[in-house]
Image (cartoon, helix red, strand yellow):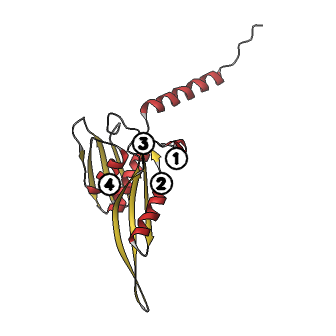
Amino acid sequence: MINTKNFNKSNTVNPILERTVKVSRVAKVIKGGRTLRFTATVVVGNGNGELGIGSGKSSNVPDAVKKAVSQAKKSMIVIPIKNGSIPYEIKSKFCGSIVLLKPAPEGTGIKAGATLRAIFEVLGIKNITTKVWRSTNPSNVVKAAYKGLNSMVDIKNELELRTDTINNNINSTKEPVSNE
């Protein structure tokens, strides 16, 4: 799992890109009539491997989007990108949505629906193939993709960490030999 602690908000060079994925009107029926509110789902990124998602609710659309962007900036994570794509295939599930993300060779482009396309545009991925099964609710699709991307690890860094851990464990278990 990629650690969000490695993400330093002050060192971002690229400007933050925002894409509104979904805006819904929600009605609450009360004694005096209907109360209308709006919910917004937004993805943000810097176009260089950093991604955040958020949702906000308010009585008007701009405030809902503003709240969603604020929440998305707080949930930003770093995702490994290899040759303009993801390093390996991943499948993830959130509620009723199942999302498959497959790396693609150079020149393929983004083969995805509007919901996932927004994620990859702000993330900076140029070549990827996707498939969504069961529920295509944009909020759940975004959360499933976020969950899958968050579980990705950079293979080289993970290998280095594991070999260091193994070497440290081997060195600590060796008993000193006494010459008596």
Instruction: Calculate the distance from the C-alpha at mark 4 to the C-alpha at mark 2.
Output: 25 Å
Q: Which residue is mark 1?
A: 9
Residues at marks 4 and 3 touching, judged by CB atoms closer than 8 Å: no
Q: Which residue is mark 4?
A: 98
Q: Is residue 63 left or right of residue 96?
A: right
Mark 1, other Cα within 10 Å: few <14 / some 14–19 / many ≥20:
few
In which quadrant of the rendered image does the C terminus lie? top right
Q: Are marks 1 and 2 in contact (CB under 8 Å)?
A: yes
Q: 111 and 1: which one is in front?
A: 111
Rendered position, 178 above or below 96: above
Percent of width and height locating residue 57: 44, 70
User: Residue 159, position in %: x, y?
Assistant: 47, 29
The three-letter amino acid code for the residue at tag 4 is Ile
Q: Are marks 2 and 3 in contact (CB under 8 Å)?
A: no
Would you call the spot at circle 4 few (<14 residues within 10 Å), some (14-19), or many (20 or more)?
Answer: many
Taking the spot 25% from the left edge, 54% from the top edge, the residue there is 113
User: Outermost residue toward the bottom?
Assistant: 32
Whether residues under marks 1 and 3 lie with C-beta atoms below 8 angstroms apart, the answer is no
Q: Earlier in the sequence, mark 2 or mark 3?
A: 2
Q: CA distance from mark 4 to mark 3?
A: 20 Å
Q: Does dot 3 land on a helix, a strand or a loop? A: loop
Q: CA distance from mark 2 to mark 3?
A: 15 Å
Choose mark 4 or mark 2, whichever is in front: 2
The span from disc 1 to disc 2 (Cα, nearest Å) is 9 Å
The amino acid type found where label 3 is placed reads: Ile
In the rendered image, which residue does mark 3 sit on?
79
